[in-house]
Image: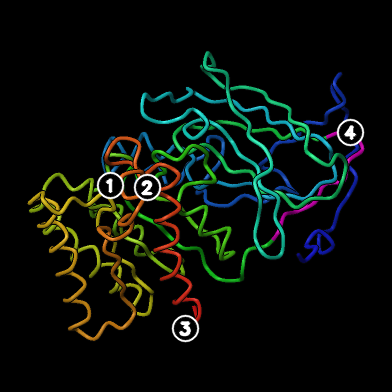
């Protein structure tokens, strides 16, 4: 593995430590590097005016930090987080380790590996503090901290041992981020850790930054958010909102329209269309929805678009583990997300090889 920490300018932190010997630093300050967000304090994924003009669910979920990451390098033997949250999201069908926790990865030149989890107590209501020792003690590591998938974050401080070195994090490939738009599945339900949703897995494998615009129950391709996304600076766009279209007729009215608006502003953008991954062939509604998405894809191809791709969700989990891919019949578990990352990642890798 390449030692990417040698490429980082590390400086000793001299701020005053607390009684436990930790120095606490605001994650929005240098040298920490933030990804996947639109704004901070509080963290948001969209401009507030766009979220408010779209629908009330997007307005609320805009503050959920799915896809937000902090990258940094340090030789500290301990990492702490001190987070302030308006509320700590707790679901019956999703682990608290996914909805409201942070997870930490060590980055190498050829990928990343899981290091630690920072989780709230079940009684937490407005934030929490966790200090974890890292295996291997004091040594220089490039790290990525993934934010919660389904909770808002007003403020985050990262604690490191007094006298430790601190610098910027590993760098993604020098291409624009991938933008994912869609439902609760896109937002990350029901991964057991933030780093296990399919976008995070793809980012670690391919080294490309991403922006998660999954809005649980409320991704309906309304014009305010579609027009906003059409103006985003991105390398690939992924459409995955089948589940949030209220019915098949609504999907028919909006699916091609969104493609045409984004394609008009981005004539050469790789555009991936995804049908629902929990497809059940015997359900007429699932068949009708898949046909609508396929119709948009055929329309694009017949009109000369060579940079449009279709992933049939029906095939993602087929095989020996097809009954083990969701937590509730709809939302992927970690097995389901791994299969989604593999299927979608192969398309994105093909696009990369063609040249982004």
Q: Earlier in the sequence, mark 1 or mark 3?
A: 1
Q: With respect to residue 331, does 130 lie above or below? A: above
Q: Which residues are magenta?
A: 161-170
Q: Earlier in the sequence, mark 2 or mark 4?
A: 4
Q: Earlier in the sequence, mark 1 or mark 4?
A: 4
For label 2, the residue is: 214
Going by the picture, which residue comes out furthest to the top?
A: 123
Q: Earlier in the sequence, mark 1 or mark 2?
A: 2
Mark 3: give few (<14), some (14-19) or many (20+) Cα within 10 Å. few
- Asked whether disc 3 touches disc 2, contact meaning CB atoms under 8 Å apart, the reply is no
- Asked whether disc 3 touches disc 4, contact meaning CB atoms under 8 Å apart, the reply is no
Q: Where's residue 137, x and y in %?
A: 86, 39
Q: With respect to residue 214, does 178 lie above or below? A: below
Q: Secondary structure at mark 3?
A: helix
- Asked whether disc 1 touches disc 4, contact meaning CB atoms under 8 Å apart, the reply is no
Q: With respect to residue 252, does 78 lie above or below? A: above
Going by the picture, which residue comes out furthest to the bottom?
A: 304
Mark 1: give few (<14), some (14-19) or many (20+) Cα within 10 Å. many
Between circles 3 and 4, the one closer to the viewer is 3
Q: Where's residue 91, x and y in %?
A: 39, 25
For label 3, the residue is: 354
Q: Secondary structure at mark 4?
A: loop
Front residue of 212/350: it is 350
Q: Where's residue 335, x and y in %?
A: 43, 47
For label 1, the residue is: 219
Q: Secondary structure at mark 2?
A: strand
């Amino acid at each position: 593995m390449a030692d990417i920490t040698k490429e980082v300018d590390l400086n000793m932190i001299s701020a005053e430590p607390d009684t436990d010997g930790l120095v606490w630093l605001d994650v929005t300050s240098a040298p920490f590097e933030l990804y996947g967000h639109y704004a901070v304090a509080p963290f948001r994924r969209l401009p507030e005016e766009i979220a408010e003009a779209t629908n009330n669910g997007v307005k609320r979920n805009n503050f959920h930090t799915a896809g937000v990451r902090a990258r940094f390098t340090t030789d500290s033997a301990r990492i702490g987080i001190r987070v302030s949250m308006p509320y700590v999201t707790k679901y019956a069908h999703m682990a608290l380790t996914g909805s409201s926790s942070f997870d930490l990865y060590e980055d190498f030149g050829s990928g990343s590996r899981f290091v630690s989890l920072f989780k709230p107590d079940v009684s937490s209501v407005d934030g929490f503090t966790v200090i974890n020792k890292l295996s291997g003690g004091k040594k220089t590591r490039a790290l990525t901290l993934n934010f919660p998938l389904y909770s808002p974050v007003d403020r985050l401080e990262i604690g490191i041992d007094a006298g430790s070195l601190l610098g910027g994090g590993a760098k993604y490939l020098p291409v624009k981020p991938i933008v994912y738009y869609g439902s609760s599945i896109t937002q990350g339900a029901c991964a057991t850790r933030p780093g296990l949703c399919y976008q995070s897995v793809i980012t670690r494998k391919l080294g490309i930054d991403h922006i998660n615009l999954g809005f649980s129950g409320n991704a309906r391709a309304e014009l305010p958010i579609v027009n906003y996304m059409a103006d985003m600076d991105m390398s690939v766009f992924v459409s995955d909102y089948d589940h949030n279209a209220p019915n098949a007729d609504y999907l028919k009215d909006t699916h091609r329209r969104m493609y045409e608006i984004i394609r008009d502003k981005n004539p050469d953008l790789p555009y991936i269309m995804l049908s629902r991954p929990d497809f059940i062939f015997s359900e007429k509604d699932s068949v009708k929805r898949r046909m609508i998405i396929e119709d948009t894809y055929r329309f694009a191809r017949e009109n000369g678009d060579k940079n449009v791709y279709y992933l049939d969700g029906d095939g993602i989990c087929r095989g020996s583990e097809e009954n083990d891919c969701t937590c509730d019949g709809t939302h992927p578990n970690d097995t389901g997300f791994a299969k989604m990352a593999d299927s979608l990642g192969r398309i994105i890798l093909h696009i990369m090889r063609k040249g982004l």
